[in-house]
Structures are given as C-alpha cells and as structure tokens.
Amino acid sequence: MAVPDRVLTNHDLEKMVDTSDQWIRERTGMFARRVSDDSTAASDLAFQASEKALAASNVSAEDLDAILVATVSGDYSWPATACILQKKLGAKNAMAFDLSAACSGFVYGLSIAQAYIQSGQYKNILLVGVDLLTKVVDWTDRNTCVLFGDGAGAVVIQPHEEKGVLCSELGADGSAADMLCVRCGGSRVPVTQEALDEKKQFLFMNGREIFRYAVRGMLQSCNKVLERTQKTIDDVSLIIPHQANTRILEAVAQKLGLSLKERFYLNIEKYANTSAATIPIALHESLEEGRLKQGDLAIFVSFGGGLTWGANLVQF
Ligand code: ACO
C-alpha cells in the first residue's frame, strides 16, 4: 500500500468548511484522511505500492504479463495510468490497461485477473487500485470534501492449485449513473469555461440515495458468492469491505447477522474513502495485523459509482 504523508483530520476540516469532528465521526466513522501534494498523481502512488507488492511476492517487473489499474482519477483522461506505471516499473513484457468501476474497481479487477489466470492467458498479473479523489472534490462543499482520501494498494496474482479467488460476483445499474459522477471532462461535456463556472469538474454525489444502493448491493454480492460456492457466512473469517461509511457497514453486518468489529476489517477512521484503493489497503493492513491466516476464507465486497458493486470470495 502507499498513501501520501500529509494527514488531514476532522479538526483541520472544521477550519475549512462548516462541519464538526462530531458530525463526521457520527455520520461516517472517519477521522483522518491522506491528501497528496500538487506534484503527486495516481501513477506515483501506484508505483510505490507496486514496487512493494513485487518485492513481497518475489516477482520482477520483467516477469509481469499484465498490469491492470483500477482508477477513476488517473494521471490523464488517457493514455492509461497502467501504461505510465508500466514505464515506471520497467515492466516491458506486460500489456497494460485501466478499468473504470469507481470504488468497485479492485473487486472488478480481481475478477478480470481471475479469468485471465483461469484461462491460462497470463501467469503474473499486477492489479492496482488507486485513487486521488481529493484532486476532484470541491473543497468548499462540506457534503463531499470530508469523505475522501488518497491512496493505492497493489497485489500480484499468480496461478495456485488451492488458494486464490474462488468466486467473483459483479453487478451494475447504469440507470443511477448520475448519482455519483464528474460532470465534465469527457466527450459529453468537454472542459469549457462555462462548465468550470458551473463547477462540473468536481465530484457530484447524491449521498442519501447511494447509501441505500450500497447496503443492498453489498449484501446481495456477499450472499451470491456464498450461494455459488455452497459456503455459509460462518465459513468466512473476515470481510474486507469498501470503506465508504461505517453506518453502511453496520447495516450490512446486521443483515448478515455478524458483529461488525469482529468480522469486518475497518480502517476508515485513518484513511476515509480512498475509492478503488480501500480494499487493497485494508487487505495489506489485515495481513500485517494477523487478522488473516493460511486457510482462512475472506470476502472482499464493494460498491461505487456507475453504480457498480461486487464481491470476491478468496481462499488464503
Ligand atoms: N458537516 C456538517 N453537516 C453536513 C455535512 C458535513 N460535512 N455534510 C452534510 N451535512 C448536512 C447536510 O447539509 C444536511 O443538512 P440539512 O438537513 O440542513 O439539509 C444534514 O447534514 C444531513 O444530510 P444527509 O445527507 O441526510 O446526511 P446523511 O446522514 O445521509 O450522511 C453521507 C451523508 C455521509 C454522505 C451519507 O449519506 C453517505 O455516506 N452516503 C454514501 C456516500 C458514499 O458512500 N459515497 C461514496 C461512494 S463510493 C465511490 O464510488 C467513490
């Protein structure tokens, strides 16, 4: 994992917009988030996380066949941040592309990597979840600026006979695409002075509606991966969820009949919502803290812009 050094706390935000530490903690569970400086872009954090993942898995950059970067805040609209990362790593034998599924990007990416591995097409895949949404939030809008932080997480995926991704379930509902979006910068509304005056370059969100979709999508994804593999929730040691709001996770835990503290990994207090990076960052920290052991089953589950959602059932 990689996060910027600068920490922005709720108390710092109290000085920037009309908000309070109490409101943010009670409504979201967040206390701090990491914010990049002007010179840092997605490929920089992705590079730091990827170098660590390659070292930890004893794979050289030249051994990589594929680089997948899940992001909605890449260095540029195009070319792909994955190509910029490929150059930084010197991974000259790897194909590279970005995938856009917002906060579900890592779960979607793992499903794609699983399919490549199962088909035998690739043997060493680098998957990165990275987002720097602090670069696209309106720092005068208290509804959104308190919610996001920057970060990256990376994994190297290889074939294995027993361990790995057992099952992935993905979903989407494009009819709700306008609930969470950046409204200019693409071919529909190019960047013009008029668009900038209307603040269309910033992240727009209908928080209350997304909350409802999030609980439903995450619950449905967890249940589907269990059904498809004929497992029960009691077989699962740890759920590593997208960290968007503690209250969303409380609702999911309650509906699954689980204790949030015991069976979910939470680090939202430290990093807030890092979009596609929340799950790989939480995975890294849960492994470091010994929350996952050999033989454990875990669920990665997410939802995000698109709207998109999904889960991976993973055997460690
Ligand atoms: N500080 C103080 N007050 C605030 C703040 C703030 N930072 N933000 C909003 N408020 C106010 C609102 O203006 C509103 O005031 P009003 O009643 O006078 O109009 C009041 O608080 C309540 O607002 P709600 O929107 O009803 O608050 P809610 O309890 O729904 O919490 C939140 C808002 C935290 C955004 C919640 O709806 C949420 O987490 N939704 C999910 C959002 C999400 O997960 N987004 C990321 C998706 S993932 C991705 O793809 C990036």
Image (cartoon, rainbow, N blue to C red):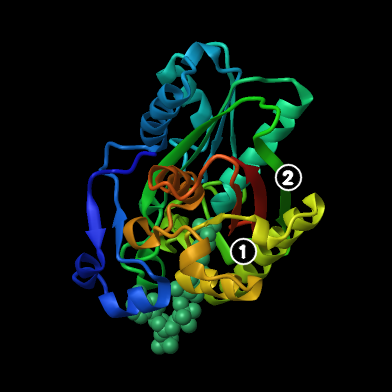
Quadrant of the displayed image that contains ligand 1: bottom left
At 63% from the left and 39% from the top, the residue drawn is 110
Instruction: Read off the residue under disc 2.
Output: 167
Mark 2 or 1, closer to the camera: 2
At 62% from the left and 50% from the top, the residue drawn is 188
Helix or strand or loop: what does disc 1 sit on? helix
Q: Which residue type carries mark 2?
A: Cys
Q: Callout 1: few (<14), some (14-19), or many (20+) C-alpha neighbours within 10 Å?
A: some
Split into 4 quadrants, where in the image is the N terminus? top left
Q: Earlier in the sequence, mark 2 or mark 1?
A: 2
Q: Is mark 2 within 8 Å of ligand 1?
A: no
Instruction: Read off the residue under disc 1.
Output: 178
Q: Nearer the viewer, residue 183 or 255?
A: 255
Q: Callout 2: few (<14), some (14-19), or many (20+) C-alpha neighbours within 10 Å?
A: some
Q: CA distance from mark 2 to mark 1?
A: 30 Å
Residue 145: x and y, percent? 36, 64
State whether residue 74 is above or below residue 214. Answer: above
Q: Which residue type carries mark 1?
A: Asp
Residue 189 seen in the figure: no
Q: Write down the quadrant of residue 67 in the picture.
A: top right
Q: Write down the quadrant of residue 20 in the picture.
A: bottom left
Residue 85: x and y, percent? 45, 25
Split into 4 quadrants, where in the image is the C terminus? top right
Residue 217: x and y, percent? 67, 64
At 35% from the left and 63% from the top, the residue drawn is 269
Tell me whether circle 2 and circle 1 mark residues in contact (CB < 8 Å).
no
Q: Nearer the viewer, residue 314 or 194?
A: 314
Q: Nearer the viewer, residue 70 or 226?
A: 226
Q: Is residue 34 left or right of residue 277?
A: left
